[in-house]
Image: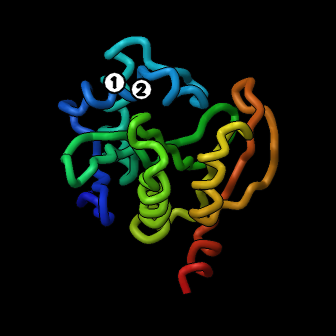
Amino acid sequence: MQPILTQRLMLRPFELQDEEAAFAFFCDPDVMRYSLNGPHNSRKLTEDFITTNMNRQGHKGYSIWAVVERASNEVIGMCGLAEFGHGLTGIELAYRLRKECWSRGYGSEAAMVSVEYPFTEIQLDRLIAAVEPANVASVQVLEKCGFERITRRPIAGKDAFLFKQTRNDWLTRQF
């Protein structure tokens, strides 16, 4: 996969040398507040996450990617696609950013291109996302990206909105 460039960001597959930068946001309880898995309490969890996504990219053509701020060339978060799990089937859009990068529009910028990629490059038919209702910023990002809220239900023991977007819906909005 070639890196995906936006005006301010680059999304690219994770590399092992990203572990330190990734651990900095994965271990932050504020960043991981709404994560179904919670914060990473060891670097090994972050290393495993990176390895899993490197393998997923190689085998499936998609993964959770490193979000790099182009101006600083620093890894500031993650955004991309993974199998959902937690009793649901589907490919999920997921994202996290370092706390100091919140409220800059980076989440929407990264999510928009992460939605485009599966519908244009690997021809997926549908994406899903789950967000706790209290995570208002993530709800807004998903709605900005064209996701439709389809239900509210417990997921992994937490109250969550479930969103979806189909390739057809995405194509309709593009033209």
Q: Name the image quarter holding residue 76.
A: top left
Identify the residue at horizontal 57%, vertical 30% (top origin): 35
Identify the residue at horizontal 71%, vertical 61% (top origin): 148
- On the image, the x and y values in percent for residue 156 come to 70, 26
Which one is nearer the viewer's eye here, 19 or 106? 106
Q: Which mark is residue 137?
A: none
The reply to whether callout 1 and callout 2 are in contact (CB within 8 Å) is: yes
Circle 2 sits in a helix, a strand or a loop, which is it? helix
**Compared with residue 39, is residue 140 higher up or lower down, i.e. above or below?**
below
In this view, the residue farthest toward the top is: 41
Q: Name the image quarter holding residue 157.
A: top right
Identify the residue at horizontal 44%, vertical 49% (top origin): 80
Label 1 Cα crowd, 10 Å radius (few <14 / some 14-19 / many 20+): many
Name the kind of residue labelled 2 in the image. Answer: Phe
Q: Which mark is residue 26?
A: 2
**Compared with residue 50, is residue 171 higher up or lower down, i.e. above or below?**
below
For residue 126, side relative to residue 102 (left or right): right
- On the image, the x and y values in percent for residue 77 come to 37, 40
Circle 1 sits in a helix, a strand or a loop, which is it? helix
Q: Which mark is residue 23?
A: 1
Label 2 Cα crowd, 10 Å radius (few <14 / some 14-19 / many 20+): many
- On the image, the x and y values in percent for residue 146 come to 62, 66
Identify the residue at horizontal 34%, vertical 25% (top origin): 24
